[in-house]
Image (cartoon, coloured by chain):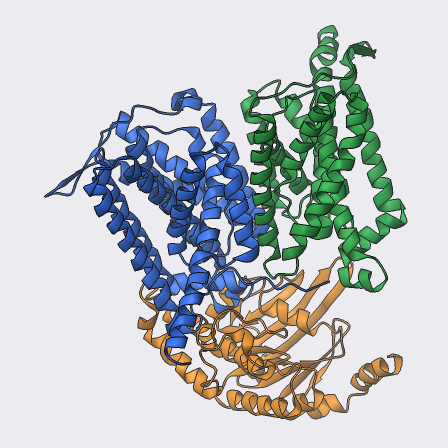
Amino acid sequence: MGEMLEWLQFVLAPQVINGASIGVAVVLMALGLTIIFGLLDVINMAHGEFYAIGAYAAVALLGVGLPFWWALGLTPLLMAVVGYATERTLIQRVFHSKERHTLTLLLTFGLAIIMEDALKIVFGANPLRLEAPISGASEVFGLFFPNYRLFVMALGSGVIAAVWLVVFRTRLGAMVRAAAYDRHMAASLGVPVAVVYAGTFAFGVALAGLAGVLLAPIYSVFPTMGRDFVLIAFSVVIIGGLGSIKGAVIAGLLLTQVQSISSLYISPVWSDPLLFAIMVLVLMWRPQGLFGRLGHA
Amino acid sequence: MNAMPDSMAAARLDAILSVSDLSVRFGALMAVNGVSFDARRGEITSVIGPNGAGKSTLFNLVSGAIRPSAGRVVFDGQELTGSPPHQMLGAGLARSFQITNLFFELSVRENLRLAAQFLEQGRGLLRPVASSRVAQQRVDELIERFRLERKQDELAGFLSHGEQRRLEIAVALAARPRMLLLDEPTQGMSHADTQETGEMIRSLAADSLSILLVEHDVDLVMSLSDHVVVMHQGQKLAEGSPQQVRSNPAVQSAYFGDAAHA
Amino acid sequence: MREMTVEPMVLSPSVTGRLLRHPIRSLAWLFFGLALLFAVVAGIQGDVFFFRLATESLIFGGLALSVDLLLGRTGLLPLGQALFFGFGAYVSALVLKQGLPSFWLAMAVVLVSTTLVGLVAGMIAIRAKGVYFALISFGLAQVVSKVVFNTRELGASDGIIGVPVPQISFGFFTVDAASPGGFFLLVLCFSAALYAVLAYLMETPFGRQLAAVRANEHRVPFLGFDPWRYKLAAFVLAANVAGLSGAFYPMLRGFVSPELMFFQVSGNAVINVIVGGTGTLIGAFYGSAVLTVLRSVVGSFTAHHQIVIGVVFMVSVIFFPKGLIGHGVAALTRWQSRKEGA
């Protein structure tokens, strides 16, 4: 009995906490992706790169001497501007084409290539390490957890809750959901659809950037970090249901736990394949994912 | 052997399509609820009903586009319930679509050739298209019959609406089905085109093709059909000859009732 | 808001019959003619570098061809075709190094194994439509490439090196894979054969069915055909094209590495197709050639050629969606009708 408790305390619990702190960031990424898809019907292949840019932006801001908290606050704002501009200049160009799905996928894919190489040019290809702004550990229920991870979980949960509130309990959120459900109807009801579109894309990108800043002190920062991370985000979004906020949250938290706990038993090399295998199974058995679309979520 | 009255047995034998207790539910809604009827060989059977009666859903059920929650579809003695659409043509059942569903970026000829390719039964799959004689001949036949000579190399998307509706029927007919399901063939057509389509349907039936027709144009239906089935809110309301149906008070109230509340 | 109609990306196979089919064929002849001309010139100069570069361009052109078969003809966007390319390369390397250094054996083994792998992958991926297919193929390639990267038996991140260079015997003459010119001509013949076979297939009922699936998959079952079967066949065929192309890689470079399965390779293949002209088949080779040259030229100034490629790609998608061949054909058609006084 004592052994079991010890195992729970010193083996399982740390994994769960680790998984939860990563999970929160994954959920932020997935939320951005799923909102962008739910509203604009756009698969943002560059989402991983926006995440990477967020991390690098933090590095840059810290490099000019700003404290971490400033970077944390500024980066999402910067990313939102980038996202807004991207949507207006690029996405809108092909939005009205019959082949919109393929074209936006390709465009964002091209953008991803450019952004990744741009990061390499500006920052170099070597991984950078970022100091965690909060050091030390706290004792919770007799266990020690790194303070920074606790902070990430707290902030992340707060943001997720705020997103939920805005989307489902405010007028702004209602406008977004209306535009997702029926664009023309929303427009004729006075919803400024163009602004809503660009703003939503900006918001999704800002979430990715925030995830990037939050995870930068945990993982190192390197130009291809986006591409590795985006597969996890896509898997979560698909399993949760493309366009479903509830799905992104639940799938994100659940799957990072699966990854985290499974790493106790299998080599870390297999944790991404495991996630991917789950995604494929879900796609085969229930292609719309666990939950519905944004319009009905 | 069960004893069955001769007339019933004869009617059963004559039925090319038998729908029994067919139902499908979408969430809480019973879009089609326990519908049963027979369509007889060589006849034009029409399904009419006010908007939302479930006619198109019924079509989708019979043609395999959606799976029923309950009931059976038997075609020419073959159990077709829940079969996927690509097996329908093999059984001899073809359909046209209410919303024109052609290959718009392909030419008229190519649309017809794709449909006629079925006649080749998988022969010549890997040989040049021109060598599929049977299919090519059928295409020529159809082009002549449906008066599409001038437009045969035109992209289907560039045809006029009436021409597209004609092509829609021609495509359904290409593989020589024994029964044709026509889903609102005169949808959006001018009066002249509608009359023409009616003539064409009549001539098709004269070739001993069985036809199941869903139509909004009640006059057309009454003039063409041998047998009429009336649907209302997912259920069969009445059935019989055009005369019988026209004078049925329940049918009248279903149509007029809608108009009164419109 | 200004409604912008972006032109369709794909040239349908039976668009206004006669006029269009010949320009594409002429452009295909042109490509192989220019390639032969190049071979003569480079051969006279005793060149090695450009022969190898051109051979590589053809090999990756074959990969792009497999992408065009799926994207331009069947309407499926594959973002992980490098999986089969790399697989073919690895199998070929293993056969040559640890089996017999026999070209024909390697090709045969690649053909069989790629068909099997393609079937399995296809059955998983084909069920998904549109965007989901792209993501599954992306994910499959990511996962497998990571596994290969971490597998010591396959050389892990270093890959397999020291692959022996085979002699390719055709009975009465032999081509030495080490000979730059000779090997280039061999790969050129192979590419031409690939193109010819696929171009022929597209004009058969099988190929036309694929075009129908692309044009309106929903209607296809009602014509009596199961689109799933055709998509799977196309997928396996594409896997083979990619795998066989990949099989040439170790013969050219003497090694294989996990990079061959990475997303960059899949992505570049898609870019090659779109820049060259989706749906034209020959556009894959043109795109690969143009972008290889571009990469080489830019690469001599800076290591950051991907950004240039990315920009070229996006410009192509937005402003020249029909690609080189597509716009080339349009120009040719205009010139032709002007000549005829139309």
Looking at the image, which is closer to me, B234 or C97? C97
Q: Residue at x 61, y 42 (%)?
A: A45
Question: Where is residue B229 shown, x and y percent of the image?
Answer: 68, 81
Chain identity for the colour orange used in the image: B
Q: Residue at x 57, y 52 (%)?
A: C130
Q: Is residue C186 left or right of residue B69?
A: left
**Image-quadrant location for residue A145:** top right
Looking at the image, which is closer to me, B143 or C155? C155
Q: Is residue A203 left or right of residue C124?
A: right
**Image-quadrant location for residue A190:** bottom right
User: How many numbered marks does the figure carry?
Assistant: 0
Asked whether residue A247 appears in the rendered view, the answer is: no
**Image-quadrant location for residue B244:** bottom right
Question: Where is residue B43 shown, x and y percent of the image?
Answer: 56, 86
Which color has been applied to chain C in this rendered view? blue
Position of C305 relative to C9 (above/below): above
* Residue most extreme to the top: A2
Position of C139 relative to A39 (above/below): above
Question: Where is residue B104 shown, x and y percent of the image?
Answer: 54, 71
Chain identity for the colour green used in the image: A
Q: Residue at x 73, y 68 (%)?
A: B33
Looking at the image, which is closer to me, B5 or A91? A91
Question: Where is residue A117 shown, x and y percent of the image?
Answer: 56, 34
